[in-house]
Amino acid sequence: MNNLNFSKEDAVKIKTLPVKQPIGVFYIGVVKASDAVAICSAKERKRDKLEEYIGMQRPLNYKRVEEIRKYVSTWDASFPNSVIVAVNPDCYFFEKEKNIIYIKRDKGSANIIDGQHRLAGFDQENGKDFDIILAIFPELELEEQAYLFSVINTKMTRINPSLAQDLYTFATINTPEKLAHNIAKTFNQDTNNPWHQKIKMLGKKEEGADPVLSQSTFTKEIVNLICSKEDSYEIRDILKRNRNKRSSLKDFYSEVETKRFILWEPFIKEEDKFIYTVLKDYFSVVSEVYKNDWGDPSKILTKTTGYIALMKVFKILYMKGFEGGDLTQNFFRINFEKAKKGSEVKEFVSTNYNPGGMGERKLAEDLLKGMELNNE
């Protein structure tokens, strides 16, 4: 394809390697992310003005794009997997003897088959010094593009989130996620802990155990009390750049934000033992006050609905206890005994507290009403 309406000066030059597979020959090349942004676009699946469906991509998840944008600016960011694109026929020419492809510098030159969120996290500024791998299909028919998109997004198995969480075992940076993983692991192994063998550490049952809650659910709620998920890449990056010194994060959140993330201050002060102890004391009290419900497979107290509700209650009790200088087991016991004697809390079964956000909020509200506290 050489008789085109653009020159080499108007194109992105990519040195490639040919790859032969049953679908045909495609090419692997390395390009600046900013150049990829300049030549690629993703067409969303929707109806056009003629009421016909066009495009194949899902709508962009802008929250995910913002997370990627933050991630690519971190010290050790990496995207080792390729972005897959199909180049339109009149938008490229190829020097076969040199394996060099020239793609017109225009966003309509290549359709993104896989990797639209990764590319959306880059722009002309943050993509100038970030190389990415392109898998380039010249003139791939639209039918084949759609088939390839479908296979990639339906046949490839996503990693179990609990397994992903468990990989923090190997982390050397002491992030909130690593702390939450360590707490989950210790709680699950400690025979004196109410969560002993009740956490599915790899998202599945282990021999000799009867877990009721996934590790990913358990750790997520702890992390949410330390920081925002959206800030996790930046927090890790700051720690990595400052040799794991959590004191380097002292100005990361404002005073207002630290009231939202109640365990942020003890985290940056490296008071891991305190965080572990106050959570253990809290759940020990719950398991004692509701001993007939704790761990009962027919009840929800130690399942997702109950656990998330209890973490909502923990946040309110923690703030009250912190202000009063009392976060002892006795403080937690007084409040839960009060809740148990009240009439607000119903039997811990799914018919009273449906699975999902509404059930979690309802259970938390009922417990707090029994304690005569507001869910603020």
Image (cartoon, rainbow, N blue to C red):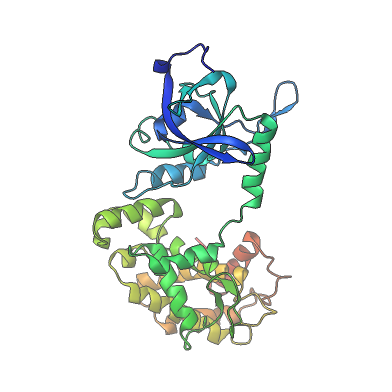
One can see residue 330 in this view: yes
In the image, 243 versus 330, the foreground residue is 243
**Quadrant hosting residue 260:** bottom left
**328, 248: nearer the viewer:** 248
Q: Is residue 295 left or right of residue 74?
A: right
Counting every numbered tag in the picture gives 0
The residue lying at 59 percent from left, 21 percent from top is: 89
Decide: is 374 above or below 2: below
Rendered location of residue 63, percent (x, y)? 50, 44
Q: Quadrant of residue 36?
A: top left
Residue 12 position within the rendered picture, expressed as x and y whole percent measured from the top left: 42, 24
Q: Is residue 245 left or right of residue 10?
A: left
Residue 137 vertical placement versus 284 (above, below): above
- In the rendered structure, the answer to whether residue 111 lies left or right of residue 325 reads right
Question: Is 359 located above or below residue 72 in the figure?
Answer: below
Most extreme residue toward the right is: 51
Residue 182 screen position, x and y as percent? 41, 73
Q: Is residue 254 above or below residue 202?
A: above
| Drawn side of residue 227 relative to residue 107, left or right | left
Q: Is residue 253 visible?
A: no
Expressed as whole percent of the image width and height from the top left, the position of residue 190 reads 46, 85
Q: Residue at x 29, y 53 (%)?
A: 238
Considering depth in this image, is 297 or 71 the residue closer to the camera? Answer: 71
Q: The N terminus appears in which quarter of the rendering?
A: top right
